[in-house]
Image: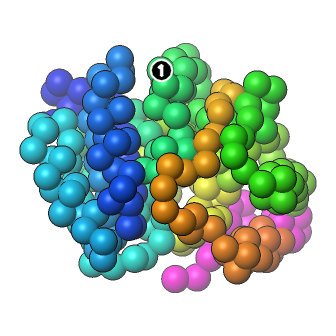
Amino acid sequence: MATRSCSTLVIVPTYNEIDNLAIQVALLMESPVELHVLVVDDNSPDGTGRLADELASDPRVFALHREGKAGLGSAYLAGFDWALEREYRTVVEMDADGSHPVSALPVLLGALSGSVDLVIGSRWVSGGQVVDWPKSREVLSRAANVYARFMLRLSTHDVTGGYRAYRSHTLQQVELDQVRSRGYCFQIDMTVRVADAGLSIAEVPITFIERRTGKSKMTWKIVVEAIALVTVWGIRRTFGRQNSPRQPR
């Protein structure tokens, strides 16, 4: 198995990231952390999938191709299944666009030691920050996190943060086959499930940098949908109808 020489897998989902992917993978290969990289590409029309295959000439890099754009959450779930089948002990989520600093990876993995089950690279704890964001986007992100924390009764500050390190046993305990979230809410959904499973969550500060090139996939429609779902989840949790978020297929 791939994990005979490596226990950490970094999952990098892609859709039209041809200008960013090679740079991000190169930075990961230069990391002091021993790791493998799995690129999960959703049939990017710009050729990112072909680039992933080229990068996979390195035995530490793998490419997983999907038929079409099915959402960030779906891509990570496919990556989780791939990692668990190959018995990686640690699974990391990381964007391809350079917004998640590779230099912070040793800190994330270091914090995962001991009794911690999930580590989130947080923008909104002391020491965390964002770079090159307009003030309006920062306010929106902070407000969304405060709202989600309040509605879902979470202590985590950056519930939407996408730079994460999971223990494999954490993923095995949160019923991945029941996760229906596919977009912006996926990270919130996973945070709730980990907390509800009685597992521990830690946050370490990171500097989040706006993407190198290309256009952000975040839209107001996605944000509004996320707020609506969090509201529904919060009401259901308040009235005890269910312990974890659910969303129809």
| Residue 3: image location, x then y, percent | 20, 32
Which residues lie in the magenta part?
Answer: 234-249
Rendered residue at 38%/60% (across/down): 17
The answer to if 248 sits in the magenta stretch is yes
Q: Between residues 98 and 10, which one lies in front from this camera angle?
A: 98
**Residue with the mark numbered 1:** 106
Q: Amino acid at mark 1?
A: Pro
Q: Is residue 112 visible?
A: no
Rendered residue at 72%/50% (across/down): 133
In the displayed structure image, the side of residue 17 where residue 165 appears, left or right? right
Q: Between residues 97 and 156, which one lies in front from this camera angle?
A: 97
| Residue 183: image location, x then y, percent | 57, 69
Q: Between residues 226 and 172, which one lies in front from this camera angle?
A: 226
Q: Residues within 10 Å of mark 1 (few under 14, many from 20)?
A: some
- Quarter of the image with the N terminus is top left
227 up-or-down from 248: above or below:
above
In the displayed structure image, the side of residue 174 where residue 135 appears, left or right? right
Q: Is residue 104 visible?
A: yes
In the displayed structure image, the side of residue 5 where residue 48 appears, left or right? right
Q: Quadrant of residue 2?
A: top left
